[in-house]
Image: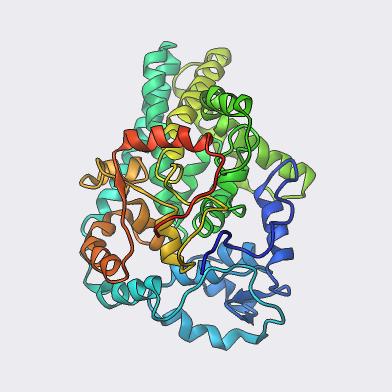
Amino acid sequence: MKHSSIAFKYPTYRDDSPKSCKRWLDGKRIDDNAEGLWRVHDKLYDLRLFMKNHPGGKDWLEMTKGVDITELFEIHHITDSAEKILPKFYVRDASSPRNYKITFEENGFYKTMKRRLASKLESLDESQVSNSRFYCDFMLTSTILFSVIAARDNNYLIASLAALSLSWLVIITHNFIHQKDNWRMYLMNLSLLNYRDWRVFHVMSHHHYPNSYHDLEISFFEPFLNWMPEKKTKTQIYFYWAVSPIVYASTLFSGFIMRMSSAIFHNQQLFADDLMPLLLPTTMYIFGNINIYVVVKIWLFIVMLSSFFYMLVAINAGHHHREIFHEGDELKSLDFGVYQLAATIDKVEVKNSLFLTLTTFGQHILHHFFPSLDHSLLPQLTEMFYETCQEFENEFREFPWWELIKGQYIQLARTETTKLSN
């Protein structure tokens, strides 16, 4: 059977402006047939009493009330311990089918991988996890030091180093946002982005439905960038290519503006940690330079350049290429694992270095399979992953990074759908 969409319904509010994570969740509550509860497959659960005991943190359950959390539940719970607890909160069967066509068959590709990982989970060598934390903390320290020195000396070269450090800090922090609540997840907020929004547009949206109409990391950039294989004029294509650097440099600012707009127009709640972006310029002012004009000027330069560095990596990390699934392309199966393979390509150059993996969204496919695992653990799954791909006749693809960058620009120009091997 051929599949060209991962859902039955076009997302409610997808084309509304301004776009926001709250609006996406509001639309999802309309589309997901969860009846105000938490939906897992075809059953409804009331998890309110479990919120404060949820090992991952109560925020996950608070933000997902009224939506289908099947994908979230499946990929963030590797062992069967959560499945054993879930029946305690069962309310009733859902009255309508799931909106999403994605499958998790017991003998399918993804669930087979998941069982095999569960059997070896306790035997994984976790000695490298401390290195992931070290790199995160080192980038935090570098960002602060370079920023203070840049403000003190009014030095744009040092500010460029601060921008690079901040961009790497954002990317490394992504590793911790997928995990249970921890203090490092808050570091995302130093960049003008917000970890709560990341858990919606990245974890819940992009990771579950990459390159589909349900992927906020696609819709956020429209109409300035459009990777969907849709009808496009040559003028539109040239426009996408021309404005890409501007989009890259403005994304961190745009993320902050969208969050504030959502608070104003969509009643999105704000929290104390929304003030964290002010910590960096405040530190620059106190320890670097009391001239507020210099501090603001250098800080804005750091954020702008950091945004460019960050987006240069993120947009070309492994999801936008002419051979990668985008909405409308045909898949041989909608097994969750097969879908992720079709929508993702790994970079060849970075897989043997933990630092490069953390700072370039490396080990991308395995991360999409098991996002709650620290990136340092993923290399230990490679052999098992290759063997399972071969067993199910699925293709694992790796490209040089330059090929992904070039392919991303070609994808912006793609107007026709295609049939994919995975």
Is 212 located above or below residue 157 in the figure?
A: below
Instruction: Indicate the quadrant containing the C terminus: top left, top right, bottom left or bottom right.
Output: bottom left
Q: Residue at x 47, y 59 (%)?
A: 181
Q: Residue at x 73, y 40 (%)?
A: 18
Q: Quadrant of residue 292?
A: top right
Q: Residue furthest right?
A: 265
Q: Nearer the viewer, residue 81 or 392?
A: 392
Q: Could you say where residue 346 lies in the image, as x and y percent from the top left? A: 33, 48
Q: Residue at x 51, y 27 (%)?
A: 303
Q: Nearer the viewer, residue 162 or 279?
A: 162
Q: Nearer the viewer, residue 359 or 68?
A: 68
Q: Could you say where residue 120 lies in the image, as x and y percent from the top left? A: 25, 74
Q: Could you say where residue 147 lies in the image, as x and y percent from the top left? A: 42, 24
Q: Residue at x 41, y 19 (%)?
A: 159
Is 221 located above or below residue 10 in the figure?
A: above
Colour basis: rainbow
Q: Is residue 371 visible?
A: no
Q: Nearer the viewer, residue 66 or 232?
A: 232
Question: In this rendering, would 68 be left or right of 358?
Answer: right
Q: Is residue 80 visible?
A: yes
Q: Quadrant of residue 350?
A: top left
Question: In this rendering, would 65 be left or right of 177?
Answer: right
Is 281 located above or below residue 314 in the figure?
A: above
Is 337 located above or below residue 202 in the figure?
A: below
Q: Looking at the image, how many numbered discs can be counted on the residues? A: 0
Q: Quadrant of residue 137?
A: top left
Question: In this rendering, would 77 be left or right of 17?
Answer: left
Q: Could you say where residue 69 lies in the image, as x and y percent from the top left? A: 58, 69
